[in-house]
Image (cartoon, rainbow, N blue to C red):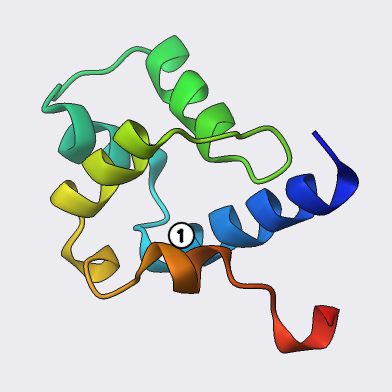
């Protein structure tokens, strides 16, 4: 993966996180329907959403959009579009 590709993913994940609840346990519960996730479950999700670690696939992004209505108006183009300040 190139540096530019990595930066694009980081920006996209930052945009997603702005629209998600701040509580990772709540995100896990809503995303997977598990009302009592373990610490490892929540940490795995935290790593998956961490902009510096993540490389989300479309299935994962689709699941997020289905479970979190605040993401439904965000297109993939908007999600992965470079910020004007980075041009």
Say whether residue 18 is visible. no
Q: Residue at x 69, y 32 (%)?
A: 53
Of the 4 image quadrants, the one containing the C terminus is bottom right
Coordinates of residue 7 in the picture (x, y in percent): 78, 54
Coordinates of residue 12 in the picture (x, y in percent): 57, 59
Q: Give above or below for 21 relative to 79.
A: above
Coordinates of residue 56 in the picture (x, y in percent): 50, 36
Q: Nearer the viewer, residue 30 or 71?
A: 71
Q: Is 7 situated left or right of 3 in this image?
A: left
Q: Give above or below for 65 relative to 78.
A: above
- Circle 1 residue: 16
Q: Give above or below for 82 relative to 30.
A: below
* Neighbourhood count class around disc 1 (C-alpha, 10 Å): few under 14, some 14–19, many 20 upward: some
Q: Residue at x 34, y 12 (%)?
A: 38
Q: Secondary structure at mark 1?
A: helix
Q: Residue at x 11, y 28 (%)?
A: 33
Coordinates of residue 26 in the picture (x, y in percent): 27, 42
Q: Is 87 situated left or right of 17 in this image?
A: right
């Amino acid at each position: 993966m190139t540096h530019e590709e990595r930066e694009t993913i980081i920006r996209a994940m930052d945009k997603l996180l702005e629209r998600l609840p701040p509580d990772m346990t709540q995100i896990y519960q809503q995303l997977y329907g598990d009302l009592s996730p373990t610490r490892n479950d929540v940490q795995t999700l935290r790593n998956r959403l961490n902009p510096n670690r993540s490389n989300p696939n479309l299935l994962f992004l689709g699941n997020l959009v289905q479970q979190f209505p605040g993401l439904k108006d965000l297109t993939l183009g908007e999600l992965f579009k470079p910020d004007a300040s980075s041009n």
